[in-house]
Amino acid sequence: MNDDRLPGATLALNDLISLLRVNITNRLKQDFVGKDQVIDLMLISTIAREHLLLVGPPGTAKSELVKRFVLLLGARKHSGDLFEYLLTRFTEPNELFGPVNIKAFQQGTFTRNIERALPQARIAFLDEVFKANSAILNALLTILNERFFFNGLEQISVPLISIFGATNEVPESSELAALYDRFLLRVRTDNVDDRQFRALLHAGWSMECERIRLGRNEEVMPVLDSLDQLQPVYDALEQVDLTPIYDDYRELVRQIRAEGITLSDRRVIKLLKLIAAAALLRGEQSASAADFWILLHIWNQPQQVAPLQALVGPVVERAGGQAIQAERNLDELADDLAGLEQRVQTRQIHIAYTATYYSALLHDLELSRQELLNHSAAQHNVHHSTSYDPTIGKRWKQLLDQTEHLIDQVLDQLEAEERI
């Protein structure tokens, strides 16, 4: 394995940023297919020292991805740099914040032994983070936001850089609203779609083969010697000129709020730090609207992804940037639909057209219908929407009508099959 670690001598800022992008994010993108957005946001969040929430079903490599990312950054798990834990509703404070110091307790003082626990971690991964109960919640909120922890009566500063949280679904309980709000960015991480499945098999099997070869000796060779070497990038944030984006940012925030997406003044200000980090990763000392792509990930509910894409995407692209697509474009959806239509209207000798076949086809069509209903193009079919565009809206409506017509055809075929 190549040793890509940063040498002891301090690198120039641009060289350090290049190292982070090439030897960390690009390497992870090769190993974790379909996770490009997640990986880019992990680096942005870490540089800006903010928190990222990963939303998606189990088995989508959330834990493994975070662990490899952090170890490449130079975190040392054995020294407590990385803390990871799966929360349940039965998780006790001792499990996160360290056990009670029994000797001190017997002498009348309540303190915890926080060695290698969350209060000493620099990066943490909390799986099922919203399973946190009331006994944990307040202390967790203080660590996330204020970066300190009450160990008994003593207030201690924590060295936390970022927390990566994971959840199967966003919380709806008002009791968890404050914790949810502490995660400035949110990103979906789903199973890889059919278009990337072959690449998934190749990358996944390569990683498994490496584990077989290395066995218990498997380890990730860090790129940085320690997390301390991220400090120059963080320090450089204050040098980024944000004045060129003030007017565009104000207008975009106004439009986002007009779409009913809650965005507090506190989050508006904190997002500036992430915009500055995005500019640095482009190798620039001045921010532009091209750095607004991070605003695609400020949604509060997954259904808000589409309107954010419609508002933010064009602004980023007009500034010469590339908006990370939170969805497939209409041409890709049309190609998929053409394939589904062929399956509906043609019959091949080697295929058994049973109820099972039609049920699977119906399932695929319904997935396409839901993707269209949640697509940003749907906003262009609503006349009072701030992003109304009749041409795009018409194309979207045609695809939706075509999908629903195909669903009706398959339902008829399924009904006929069941009568036989």
Image: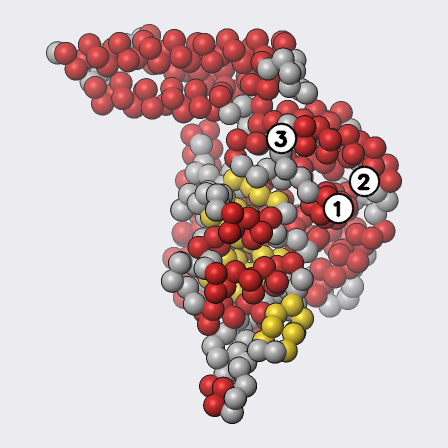
Secondary structure found at label 2: loop
Please name whichever residue, 150 or 365, is drawn nearer the observer in this view of the structure.
150
Secondary structure found at label 1: helix
Residue 260 tag number: 3
Please name whichever residue, 269 or 106, is drawn nearer the observer in this view of the structure.
106
Q: Quadrant of residue 158?
A: bottom right
Q: Amino acid at mark 3?
A: Gly
Alpha-carbon span between mark 1 and mark 3? 19 Å
Instruction: Select label 3 or label 2 by which is in front.
Output: 3
Where residue 274 sits: x, y (%)?
72, 46
In this orientation, does residue 60 appear?
no
Q: Is residue 383 left or right of residue 105?
A: right
Question: Above or below — where is 7 with respect to 40?
Answer: below
Position of the N terminus by quadrant: bottom right
Q: Amino acid at mark 2?
A: Ala
Question: Above or below — where is 126 with respect to 367?
Answer: below
Position of the C terminus by quadrant: top left
Alpha-carbon span between mark 1 and mark 2? 15 Å
* Residue depicted at x 65% and y 68%: 148
Question: Label 3 neighbourhood size at 10 Å, few (<14), some (14-19), many (20+)?
Answer: few
Question: Label 1 neighbourhood size at 10 Å, few (<14), some (14-19), many (20+)?
Answer: few
Residue 287 tag number: 2
Disc with the residue nearer the chain's start (1 vs 3):
3
Question: Label 2 neighbourhood size at 10 Å, few (<14), some (14-19), many (20+)?
Answer: many
Where residue 314 sits: x, y (%)?
70, 24
Q: Which residue is mark 1?
A: 269
Q: Amino acid at mark 1?
A: Ile
